[in-house]
Image (cartoon, grey):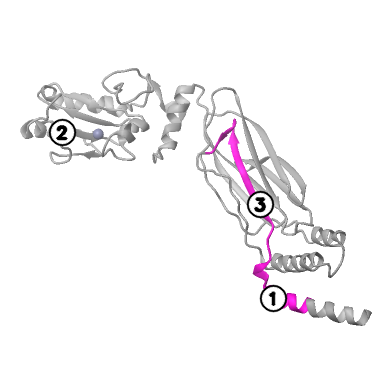
Amino acid sequence: MGMIRLVVRSCLCLTLVIVFPVSSFAQDEAWVDALTVDGQPAASLHPSHIPLPLRPDQQRKKWIVALASTLQRLHLVGSPLMSRSLFSASRSAAPPAYTMRRSGTLRGSSKASTVDIACSGGGRSANPDADIYATINIWVGSSKVATSTGFGPSPTVYAHFEAASVDYDRPISCDLQAGFGYAYASGTLLADCGNVDVTNLRNEYRSFTVDWIPNCNEFQEIGVNEFNHSEDNTHQPWAIVKDIVYVKRAEVQEYALYQVRITSSYRCPHINASIPNSAHNSHHMKGDALDMTPPSNRWSPPTETEFNHLHDAAAQTGPRFITDWSTYSDRHLHCDWGG
Ligand SMILES: [Zn+2]
């Protein structure tokens, strides 16, 4: 009788090996639920669920563990305890060979001198009868600042860190290893400019994906003037107007025969984005551009002669870029100096 059982068992084992290719076995999974700063989720970071491909040596171990798990579930071999110890023993301490990245932007805060970076996630064992370790790490730049672990068939983990605010951006990330699964989330801890209005205005450059992000100290308390119109910038009195604009505006005036009117200079990113046909990375956001018209034509387009006179005056100032008569239907002149 014992002999017959052994034969049946061997046959089943053989069948299982043939029927289940390696890829059909489940893998451990890991995911990062959220990477937040002061409770604000990163804009483009969503709950992620990232099972990862395994290295060949991990594949082999997984195959053995999964086969043992299947046989055990079919009550062919071992006890749940045996499978558990087998699985735990096969857990590799080696760093994962593959990473997946999700990028996001995190909002800084000016509410306090510190910000709380938090990361949460979890994992699931490929074998529901086997426990796995889950380890979560938070990184600021290249420094690991917080770590936390969990253990179980479906462990959840959470870590947080109180970071001192600084006036420059820092990359932050969170990684999570659960058994053989690995997940990663990254973002940017935005500068705290020490003034909530300046911090928010600076953050607009990132949220509107402008190709240039000013330093905190580039914003000046300018107030409404011809370089900082209230309809172009709702973050008064803060704006960026580079020194070269003051110099070149005076030069244009010197070369022109009439009082030149500045119709637009500094624009905050959200206003710039709302203007039809505006350049995505417009120099108006960089504080080195001017839109000009002859004053008598403030509410109606200038004649071609008037435009060309203004164009010739501005062209003498050595602009980086200058438009011509055919560029805009309202016939304003755009000039920027890339300073
Ligand atoms: Zn312009």
**Location of residue 184 in the rendering, given as x and y in whole percent from the top left corner:** 61, 49
- State ligand 1's quadrant: top left
Q: Which residue matches tag 3?
A: 30
Q: Quadrant of residue 120?
A: top right
Q: Does residue 322 belong to the magenta stretch?
A: no
Q: Residue at x 88, y 78 (%)?
A: 5
Under mark 3, the amino acid is Ala
> Could you classify mark 1 by the number of other residues whose Cα lies within 10 Å: few (under 14), some (14-19), or many (20 or more)?
few
Q: Residue at x 33, y 40 (%)?
A: 280
| Alpha carbon separation for disc pair 1 and 3 | 27 Å
**Where does the magenta region start and end?**
13-42
Q: Does residue 21 belong to the magenta stretch?
A: yes
Q: Quadrant of residue 150?
A: top right
Which corner quadrant holds the C terminus? top left
Under mark 2, the amino acid is Asp
Q: Do the residues under discs 2 and 3 have CB atoms within 8 angstroms? A: no
**Location of residue 40 in the rendering, given as x and y in whole percent from the top left corner:** 56, 33
Q: Which residue matches tag 1?
A: 19
Q: Quadrant of residue 60?
A: bottom right
> Could you classify mark 3 by the number of other residues whose Cα lies within 10 Å: few (under 14), some (14-19), or many (20 or more)?
many
Between marks 1 and 3 in the image, the one whose residue lies nearer the viewer = 1
Q: Which residue matches tag 2?
A: 330
Q: Secondary structure at mark 3?
A: strand
Q: Nearer the viewer, residue 73 or 208?
A: 73
Q: Secondary structure at mark 2?
A: loop
